[in-house]
Amino acid sequence: MKQSGIQTGVSDVYKDIVNHYSEQHRHYHNLVHIYDALLEFDESKQLAQNPLAVELAIWFHDIIYDTKASNNEERSADFTYETLDGLGFTKTVCELVSQMIVATKHDCKPSDSDTELLIDIDLSILGQPPKRFTSYEREVRAEYVWVSDLDFKERRSVILNLFLARKKIYSTDLLHKKYERKARENIRWSIQRLTQ
């Protein structure tokens, strides 16, 4: 039986997603990250006002990932808008998902509860058990292999200290209770190690 146009389109988009997340330079921001985020979403989906938008944002939020660029989120949002528009999603959904993706820059407070949930899911790695968190730290370093040790330690320490300075790392009660304490422990440990 022949696939319909929309089925063919979805299949092509899925292959494109897999290809992007399978790029050689990705050690953390890859399909495993998306899989873990989707598992986290399965456990927190009841919090979403628009579950479809949140799930789409999870799939696409790191679709463009260039460690030498500072506009990955914006480029991912543009890619997502064009892709979803091409699949026939409404302009409202395209805009909503794109805005959520830009928010994963983690440089400002989320403007709505679905974006809070997306960001909490994206940051859930910070609250993982020590073994997984340590692996994550190694994976991030591998993605920035071109950066000198001194520069990496300085930049990474700044980023981690910004998270530590927040009153709350996680906005949703569910993920705050689940990860906040451990995330702060992990971040303090990482900063200490980076500054030794």
Image (tube, helix red, strand yellow):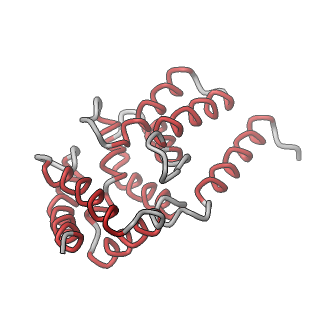
Q: Is residue 14 left or right of residue 70?
A: right
The x and y percentages for residue 83 are 64, 34
Q: Is residue 182 above or below residue 87?
A: below
At 44% from the left and 43% from the top, the residue drawn is 70
* Camera-side residue of 5 and 112: 112
Q: Is residue 86 left or right of residue 130?
A: right
How many numbered marks appear? 0
At 31% from the left and 58% from the top, the residue drawn is 124
* Camera-side residue of 168 and 162: 162
The x and y percentages for residue 130 are 26, 76
Q: Is residue 25 above or below residue 41?
A: below
At 57% from the left and 36% from the top, the residue drawn is 80
Q: Residue furthest bottom?
A: 131
Q: Is residue 131 above or below residue 124?
A: below
Q: Is residue 18 left or right of residue 137?
A: right
At 21% from the left and 62% from the top, the residue drawn is 183
**The C terminus - image quarter:** bottom left
The x and y percentages for residue 125 are 33, 62
Q: Quadrant of residue 18?
A: bottom right
The x and y percentages for residue 43 are 36, 55
